[in-house]
Image (cartoon, rainbow, N blue to C red):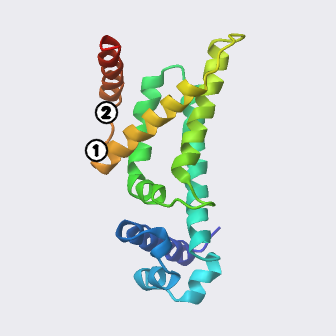
Amino acid sequence: MTDLRVLKTQKAVQTAFVDLLYEKEFKDISVQEICDKALVNRNTFYKYYSGKSGLAGKMIAEFRQDYAALLNKRLAARDVRAVMREIMPELYEKRRILLALWRIETRRHRLFQEMQGLLRQAFLAQAAAKFPGRDKNWEFQATLFATCVLTTLRFYFEQNILPPVEQVMSDWREMFDIMHDNL
């Protein structure tokens, strides 16, 4: 069991880091700034993290694990809308952290792209299960799906609005209908 003081310190460091990501680019943030904002000394910071990249990596890994679990929950569901209504509030609760972590784009840290990859793989698995033996390259549709999902999340989260599942699905259908009619 982790000491409550350790959890509070790590939470303070992570919150300070997220706050700084809203103020400036990842590359421009120093460990000292994180420590100053979190009210911890450098030795305490380095006790838990190897540096700002280590901090980012740990936060991204934790989120990626949570996201993979939510995605698996969605894939196992028969009633997609019900599960999406359940999942959205969980993601919405973490929107501030998620939006901040999406801002980090380095060779090691690319959460937005990693989430796109997970969605693409989930779509490909669903397509193969739904249409076994069909000789079709699903890559384009998988990429389009992942892009639509994450762009939708980003749009609503930046507006501080819980994505309304039914409305989003209706909007997507309408968007494709509009484009279909004009092709």
Which quarter of the picture shows residue 183? top left
Q: Give the residue type that dot 2 points to.
A: Pro
Secondary structure found at label 2: loop
Residue that sits furthest to the right in the current view: 133
Quadrant where the N terminus is found in the figure: bottom right
Circle 2 crowding by C-alpha within 10 Å: few under 14, some 14–19, many from 20: some
x and y percentages locating residue 59 in the rendered image: 55, 62
The residue positioned 39% from the left and 52% from the top of the image is 95
Mark 2 near mark 1, Cβ–Cβ under 8 Å? yes
In this picture, residue 138 sits left or right of residue 157: right
Q: CA distance from mark 2 to mark 1?
A: 8 Å
The disc placed on residue 164 is 2
Number of marks present in the image shown: 2
x, y percentage for residue 7?
54, 71
Image position, residue 62 (x, y; %): 59, 56
Q: Nearer the viewer, residue 56 or 27?
A: 27
Which sits in the foreground, 164 or 54?
Answer: 54
Q: Amino acid at mark 1?
A: Ile
| Circle number at residue 59 | none
* Residue under pointer 1: 161
Q: Is residue 12 left or right of residue 178?
A: right
- Seen at 46% across and 71% down, the residue is 17
Q: Is residue 49 left or right of residue 159?
A: right
- For the point 40% across and 81% down, which residue is it? 37
Quarter of the rendering containing residue 25: bottom left
